[in-house]
Amino acid sequence: MSMFDMMGMMGKVKEMQSKMQEAQDKLSDITAEGESGGGMVKALVNGKKELLNIEIEPELINPADAKMLSDLIVAAVNNALSAVEGKAKVEMEKVTEGIIPKIPGFDLG
C-alpha cells in the first residue's frame, strides 16, 4: 500500500467519523410517540432514546390502579422507543450512505 493510498484511506476514516458525529447529533432532533391504553398514556422520545414527555389522562390516575398505570406507562415508552429506533436507523443510513460499505450482518444500530 503506497503512502498516497494510506493518506486517502485516512481521509475516508476522518470523513466517516465526521458523518457519524453529524448523524449522532441529529438523533436528538428525531422524535417518536408511543401510546398505550387506547391513547390514554402517551410517551415522546428522541433518537438518543431519551424520554422527553409523558401524558396521562387524568381519569387513569387512581391510587388503587397504580400497577395498571405503571404497566401502561412502560408499554407507551417501549412503543415510542421501538418507533424511534426505526427512524434513527433510516437517518443514520442517509448520513453514512456512500461512506460505509454495505456489509452483510453489519448494523450501526
Image: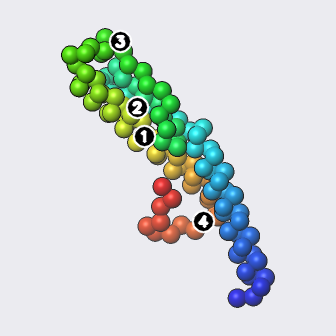
- The outermost residue toward the left is 64
Q: Which residue is mark 1?
A: 81
Of callouts 3 and 2, which one flags the residue occurring earlier in the amino acid sequence? 2
Residue count near mark 2 (Cα–Cα under 10 Å), binned few <14, some 14–19, many ≥20? many
The three-letter amino acid code for the residue at tag 1 is Leu
Q: Is residue 14 left or right of residue 24?
A: right
Which amino acid type is marked by label 4?
Answer: Ile
The residue indicated by pointer 2 is 34
N-terminal label among 3 and 4: 3
Which quadrant is home to the N terminus?
A: bottom right
Q: Residue at x 29, y 27 (%)?
A: 70
Identify the secondary structure beneath mark 4.
loop
From this view, report whether residue 42 is shown above or below residue 10: above
**Which residue in the structure is indicated by mark 4?**
100
Q: Earlier in the sequence, mark 1 or mark 2?
A: 2
Cα separation, mark 3 vs mark 4, equals 48 Å
Vertical order, 99 against 35 (above or below): below
Q: Are marks 1 and 2 in contact (CB under 8 Å)?
A: yes
In the rendered image, residue 108, in percent from the top left (x then y), is placed at: 51, 59
Amino acid bearing label 2: Gly
Report which residue position mark 3 lands on: 58
Whether residue 102 sits left or right of residue 38 in the image: it is: right
